[in-house]
Amino acid sequence: MNDTTASLKESVGRYGVWSVQLRSEEPEGGAERAEAAAELERLGYGALWLGGNSAARHAAPLIQATSRIVVGTSIQSIWEHGAAEAAAGLAELEVSHPGRFVLGLGVSHGPRVEGYRRPYSTMVGYLDDLDRAGMRSGHRVLAALGPKMLDLSRDRAAGAIPYLVTPEHTAQARERLGAAPLLAPEFKVVLDSDASRARATARAYLAMYLKLPNYTKNFLNLGFTDADVTGGGSDRLIDAVFAWGDEATIRARIDAFHDAGADHVALQVVEDDPARLPRDGWRRLAALLA
């Protein structure tokens, strides 16, 4: 393990928050986002992972509002942000706030990218460009699901940040990565113990992801069936990729990722209003993780 990767593992700790709301550029919400980031730091989370197609400019205000928490992109699309831009954004934050920003990169999805082609080869070329721009591999992580991208995460980055996965995937990823790289899967939490209500919230949120073949293919590779990934997702699938229930059940579901080999779990609180910062949910989650 190189010093940069070891330092990243220590900095992000065991738990972080994944949020697309914190990535927003709406000016009227800037003060609340900064306040929320500072509170998440006080609550003990080690990292904030910015959903959507995020970049260093989205991380900067949150880093400025806090003193230690790491902020990462999850992910920055390699199709929409050039390597020179990405390297410059990281370098600027590294000067002003060293060790506080990590560049999470991904290949996005065919249905969302015009001219989508050869994602693995394109990622290899992008990493080559980052190297030429002077970015060290320890400052970047990859959104890796399949074995080839996991190999890149091991060999050309500080580790992997898989999205929408299960502990079974985490175990497979850890075996592929080896012990040294950071493995930080994202995991969704619905803080509701009513089965039908929690599953309805989860199913509504999962719907957009079931239209993306990268995820459905990964589910099939993990042993789910076509029936599981159609019709909004089976209860079996919902219960595998979301934690819901009482506090002990949710804590056990999160612990399963660590038991499977995760260093860090990026927790996404899912509620019925996806535009609102789930601040009470983050507080409740921090309490049950304490």
Image (cartoon, rainbow, N blue to C red):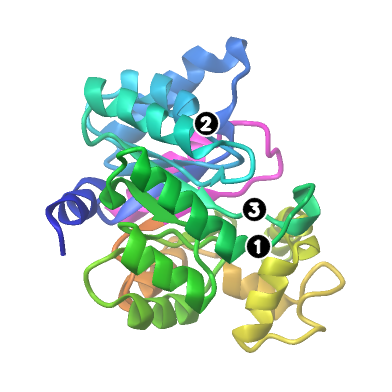
Q: Which residue is mark 1?
A: 194
Q: Picture coordinates of residue 242 (x, y %)?
A: 58, 65
Residue nearer the viewer, 270 or 143:
143
- Going by the numbered disc 2, the residue's amino acid type is Leu
Q: Is 3 positioned to the left or the right of 222 in the image?
A: left
Where residue 91 appears, as percent x and y from the top left, is: 31, 29
Looking at the rendered structure, the kind of residue marked 3 is Ser
Q: Is residue 175 visible?
A: yes
Residue found 61% across the figure and 49% down from its top = 270
| Magenta stretch, residue numbers | 266-290
Residue 197 is situated, as x and y percent measured from the top left of the image, at 72, 59
Up-down relation of residue 74 to residue 171 (above or below)? above
For marks 2 and 1 on the same chain, the one whose residue lies earlier in the sequence: 2
Helix, strand or loop at mark 2: helix
Q: Which residue is mark 3?
A: 108
Which residue is depicted at the point 49% across and 18% down? 32
